[in-house]
Image (cartoon, rainbow, N blue to C red):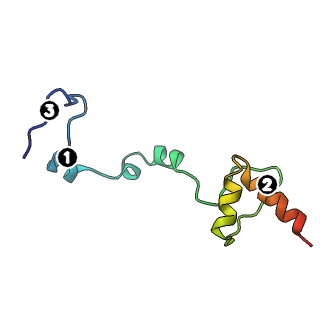
Amino acid sequence: MKKPNPELTDRDNPEWTEDDFARARPAKEVHPDLVAHSEKRKRGERGPQKKPVKELVSLRIDRDVIAKYKATGKGWQVRMTEALRKAAP
């Protein structure tokens, strides 16, 4: 086993040993309140809205079309929505 470089060793945060891993517990078990507070929202979930105006859908669009919209820069999804709105019957 290679010896660690003493200049790169962090004395305040040493490398874990096998024993450390054996004693480790999931964060959710140790601090459930902190974990619950910091968990990210799941895909499709949004924060509170005054009036929901958008709907999450799955739509297959050709790669070249997506690439062209993305190439127009930030806001490409809004521009795509506008184009779909104009084309809607």
Q: Position of residue 21 (x, y in %)?
A: 21, 51
Q: Identify residue type, mark 3.
A: Asn
Give neighbour class at mark 1: few <14, some 14-19, many 20+ (Cα, 10 Å).
Answer: few
Q: CA distance from mark 3 to mark 1?
A: 21 Å
Q: Where is 51 relative to 5, above or below?
A: below
Give SS at disc 1. helix
Q: Which residue is mark 1?
A: 20
Distance from disc 1 to disc 2, alpha carbons, whole Å, reads: 52 Å
Residue closest to the eye, 2 or 53: 2
Which label sits in the foreground, 3 or 1? Answer: 3
Q: Which residue is mark 2?
A: 79
Residue at image coords 8%, 38%: 3
Of 51 and 74, the residue lying toward us = 74
Q: Does residue 67 appear left or right of residue 13 in this picture?
A: right
Mark nearest the camera among 1 and 2 is 2
Report crowding for label 2: few under 14, some 14 to 19, many 20 or more residues within 10 A (C-alpha): some
Mark nearer the viewer, 2 or 3:
2
Question: For the residue marked with disc 1, what is the amino acid?
Answer: Asp
Residue at x-position 20% and y-position 30%: 8
Residue depicted at x 44% and y 49%: 32
Residue 34's x, y, as percent?
A: 47, 43
Q: Label 2 is placed on what type of residue?
A: Arg
Image check: 57 left or right of 17?
right
Determine whether the residue tagged by mark 2 lies in a helix, strand or loop.
helix
Please tell me which of labels 1 and 2 falls first in the chain: 1
Q: Looking at the image, which residue sits at the far right? A: 89
